[in-house]
Image: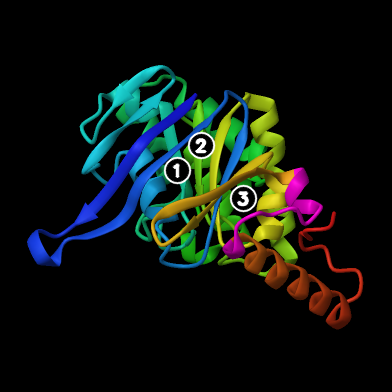
Amino acid sequence: MIEVHEATVAYGDGSGRIEAVRSVSFNAAAGEIFGLVGESGCGKSTLLRAVAGLAPLAKGHIVLAGREVGISRTRQERRLVQMVFQDPYGSLNPTHTVDKILSEPLAIQGLDAIDRRVIQAFQEVGLGGQHRYRYPHQLSGGQRQRVAIARALITEPRILLLDEPTSALDLSVQAEILNLLKRIGRAHGLTMLMVSHDLAVIAHMCTRIAVMYQGEIVEMLEVQRLRRGEADHPYTRMLLDASLEKTRQGERDTEGTSSPSLTR
């Protein structure tokens, strides 16, 4: 469903040219949740934006559902891929009610039965009707992210891009949102490409991951290997050690935590 071939994303020209992503290749099968993991600034979110059509490729190719796409896309190609951003407040128009936020993509795509689709979207992400005519600032962080997920789903995409979808949320709601995404993915047969710096979150969601470092993929592995601590590249092993230490520290500080863990 997603094929990325030798993708490079660059900014600037001449001596000021910076390659944020360099010659990256991977693929994700239909219905798979594939993860991109790495520290801040490694290029993973830039790569996600390129797949979404929000950042142009300097070279390489992106193929979605068997069709090569570029920065300029048709309305149907835009509908194929939707994205959930890291900051649920910054990604929602503060001057629009939730009803308008969800109705607008339907109108842009020329879809009918807008009222029915909005109500269905609310039910799917676990929001009550009392939230429909509220503004983003009147919602909690978790509720805002549910609205963002509903907006991404409402045009019935086949690919969902997730850019650190829980990192801006309290620990108490992170697992709720991740489980919601997994349930929705299974129900709709979605292919998901998820970006995170947190190995525990990636292990909770994904079946395979690509580890990015300084704009390149340095290792690809199955999540089961990750859980067993089987990593080949030194950078992956460093991430793994840091994640395990974070898990141990969290277990010491908080009993019965519901946040994702690399070991479960």
Residue 132 appears in the picture as rendered: no
Please report the bounds of the magenta region as a residue range: 224-235
Tell me the crowding category of disc 3: few under 14, some 14 to 19, or many 20 or more residues within 10 angstroms, Cα based: few
In-front residue for pair 67/80: 67
In-front residue for pair 133/225: 225
Residue at image mark 1: 83
Mark 2: amino acid: Leu
Q: Nearer the viewer, mark 2 or mark 3?
A: 2
Q: Which dot marks residue 3?
A: none
Q: Which dot marks residue 160?
A: 2
Q: Are marks 2 and 3 in contact (CB under 8 Å)?
A: no
Q: Does residue 208 appear to the left or right of 176 in the view shown?
A: left
Q: Are marks 1 and 2 in contact (CB under 8 Å)?
A: yes
Q: Quadrant of the C terminus?
A: bottom right
Q: Residue at x 62, y 31 (%)?
A: 32
Magenta residue check for 230 = yes
Examine the rendered structure and indicate whether residue 221 appears above or below residue 153: below
| Disc 1 from disc 3: Cα separation | 25 Å
Mark 1: amino acid: Met
Q: Nearer the viewer, mark 1 or mark 3?
A: 1
Percent across and percent down for residue 214 are 41, 62
Percent across and percent down for residue 30 are 57, 23
Percent across and percent down for residue 169 are 61, 66
Tell me the crowding category of disc 2: few under 14, some 14 to 19, or many 20 or more residues within 10 angstroms, Cα based: many
Mark 3: amino acid: Gln
Residue at image mark 3: 130
Examine the rendered structure and indicate whether residue 154 appears above or below residue 256: above
